Image: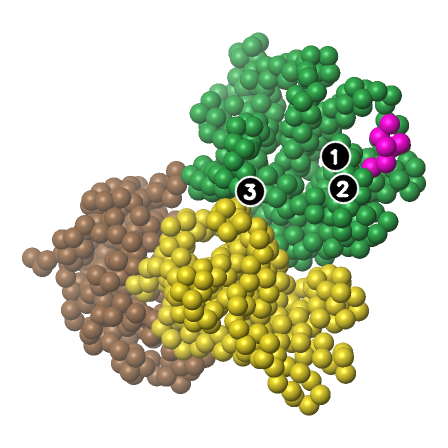
Amino acid sequence: MRESILNVQGLNAHYGDFQALYGVDLDVAEGEVLAIIGANGAGKTTLMRSITGLLRNGAGQISYRGQDIGGLRADQVASLGVAMVPEGRQLFRSLSVEENLIIGGQVGRKGAWDLAAVQKLFPILKERCHVPATALSGGQQQMVAIGRALMANPDLILFDEISLGLAPIIIKDIYDALPGIIGTGMSAMIVEQDITKALSVSSRVYCLQEGRVSLEGQSATIERADISRAYFGVE
Amino acid sequence: MSLQNYTVTRTSQAARAAAILGALVLLVLIAAPWWAGRADMRLMGEIFLYLALASLWNLMAGYAGLVSVGQQAFVGFGGYILFALTIFVGLPPIVAIAAAGVLGAIIAVPMAALIFRLRGAYFAIGTWVFAEVFRLSFAQISSLGGGSGSSLPVGIVRSMAASRDGRESLSYWLALGIAVLVIAAVYLFLRSRNGLALTAIRDNELAAGSLGIDIWRTKFVVYVVTAGLTAMVGALIFLQKLRISPDAAFSVNDWTAFVIFIVVIGGIGTIEGPIIGTLIFFALRETLADLGTTYLIVLGLVAIVVMLKAPKGVWSLIRTRFDLQLFPLGYRVQHNDKKAD
Amino acid sequence: MDWLNAVVQGTLLGGLYALFAAGLSLIFGVMRLVNIAHGDLIILAAYLGLTVTTVAGVHPLLALLIVVPAMGLIGYALQRGILNQTLGDDLLPPLLVTFGLSVILQNGLLEIYTADPQKMDAGALEIASFAVGSLTLGVLPVLTFAIAVAVIWGLQWTFYRTALGRAFRAVSDNQDIAQLMGLNRRHIFGLAMALALAVTAIAGILLGIRTSFDPSVGGGRLIFGFEAVIIGGLGNLWGTLAGGVILGVAQTVGAKIDPGWQILAGHIVFLLILAVRPNGLFPRVSG
């Protein structure tokens, strides 16, 4: 039984008076790739924001490597080795491609990923390194966003809807590269609306529906019919 | 649950009670020349004028989102126009006050056209620049005393009423009248469609715009009307002071800093807020004014603390505690069984 | 020739105005905050310089060595202690809190130093001059302009060539994601304010050497700085220098026409530019 790198227990997340997550239980084993699927508004991004500390929900609900991180600021969680490729890329538009990557390494964690390694992975980023990041195409911006997260040499990397707004051929390329990117040792959570893609790269899958976990299973053997039911919430 | 069992009303028990109480208070205030001493009447007059200025600033900032730190432009403008019209044109002071209001509104039109190009805090400083332009410009007019100012000729003062008591009563009633006029105008405006539009804009400008509300025009109307009414108050202020100078007319401290503190402490974005704020401000002033600069420092500190800890002011603390709205602006759904109350 | 002299003097004056404006511009760029107390902080720096020169008996320019770090610390404390709590979508809190701060500063200075106009004594520097063609240039104004250029160059360099500048730009673009990069935004904002007030300290000392000052003149400096920023265009520090120069020239030329018109002329030029080019002359971001 592998150690969990991330343990979420009974997570209740709120935006003001509005509750977005109800008692979510979830764990990510060390070195595992976990998929989180669900419809729009199911709470997937809320979950990501809660884990990274962008949304603070109080202590005792999320632990990382055994340490309670619910009360930490986002920058503190980042320095522990959690990085995210945010929904919609969200590159820094005042920074060039290269600067976006460099700032990804701001946390100062050592590891396999540095500027040269990222540029080797995505050669186009070296070509266009001084261009303002938001001037790139959608697919290229996604590469920058992924590279930026890798620069932090995280132990847990979160991908939030990386296929959103991209052409199918680009999505295919990125997902083909994904196993190589995550490599061995890094744990990952992949939030996706595209179920096929999500299942293809992950070992386990959770389905969220209206703020609750509606299904959990092995990616390789889970039944499509079960997913449909859990995804849409119909009996 | 049937809709027929519910009615929509605009008022509540508390509001009705407050209305009756308010009418009684107003009667007492009108009768003040008979029961209050000279000093008390002057103080009350000052309170009414600050209340008017505060209510107007609150309408602009709290409802229209136009935060101005330059309203002193119109206060001073109103004062100078009063002096000019009574001295050079020979208008009776009361007519001059009304004229000052109209002229204030007129001059606000081109100002708005320019100043609306700025947003947020830059808009605020821009209004200050305008006030400075007014101050420097009026200081150039030697017939009105230039940089050192001038006094209102005795004849004009005497023309208002025969006796000193009569003049003081008249000043007092004018101040009370303007305060009532301003509050009534603000209240009726906010109750109207324009007011609803304003609240919508304040809450979510993008959504309001997509509903077809003409944001620019609504804000423009508020700016111009506020300017006119502020000029009227300014005219009255300097009619009572009997003397005007550029520094006094366009003082940031007197006509903006104090007003802002009143609104912030009382509760921005509500009609009741400026009333409470004015009372608190004057209570503080009467107790602390001897301390001069310390008083102002305390005021600044109180404003900062209120803004950080209770940004909606004292009234909001009361309102959320007791769910009160004395000037009914909203709509309430009441069950028909309660209608008999 | 007199007109040329006025233009040159105005240009040099513009350097001082650009220094007033640089701090304002930086803070708006990083945190979208406009500090109404900015002008009063310039005056605070002037008074600190006065105290240092009086107590330590040093030349005002040497006082920079103490006042600049001191103001930097004040800026950091101010931001983390009070101003960070006002940041958010609502425009009112920062505006009203900094307004309150302005009143406190003015009256605090009034209490401590009284309303008497003060001035720092820089000795020979104040009257030294040299000739360029038929013009006489004062050493102090030229030095001020040179310092302004150096400061702006330094700020640009910081913003675009250092990790700190990268952090400033990232936090200004997207606070949330910047935090994911391990940036503590409260700390970053504190550093930005510290830097802005350090620049403000330089402006205050140079002002204090050049003219007399008293606690009430802060508002006027804020307005000059603000006008320089708007004329030059938001988000562009070199534009701010240009804006300062235009303002300075407008004022000196206006003064040539009539001494009482000096400041008014500046305001009128500002309003004209606002009318025809509302985004300023060299804008990089919109307000």
A65 relative to A127 in the view: left or right:
left
Q: Position of residue B151 (x, y in %)?
A: 81, 39
Q: Which chain is green?
A: B
Residue that badge 1 annotates: B241
* Amino acid marked by disc 3: Asp
Q: Residue furthest right?
A: B89
Pointer 2: residues within 10 angstroms few (<14), some, or many (20+)? many
Helix, strand or loop at label 2? It is: strand
Residue that badge 3 annotates: B203
Helix, strand or loop at label 1? It is: helix
Pointer 1: residues within 10 angstroms few (<14), some, or many (20+)? few
Q: Tell me: residue B272, above or below residue C150.
A: above
User: B323 or B131, which lies in front?
Assistant: B131
Q: Is residue B154 magenta?
A: yes
Q: Which residues are magenta?
A: B152-158
Q: Residue furthest bottom?
A: C133
Q: Which residue corresponds to the image point at 67% horizontal and 69% vertical from the top-left?
A: C247
Helix, strand or loop at label 3? It is: helix
Residue that badge 2 annotates: B244
Look at discs 3 and 2 and give the one toward the viewer: 2
Residue A80 lies in what quarter of the image? bottom left
Query: Going from the N terminus, do you reach mark 3 or mark 2 first?
Result: 3
Q: Say which quadrant the C terminus of chain B sits in.
A: top right
Q: Which residue corresponds to the image point at 77% horizontal and 71% vertical from the top-left?
A: C256
B109 relative to A206 in the view: left or right:
right
Q: Is residue C3 visible?
A: yes
Query: Going from the N terminus, do you reach mark 1 or mark 3 first?
Result: 3
Look at discs 1 and 3 and give the one toward the viewer: 1
- The dominant secondary structure in magenta is helix
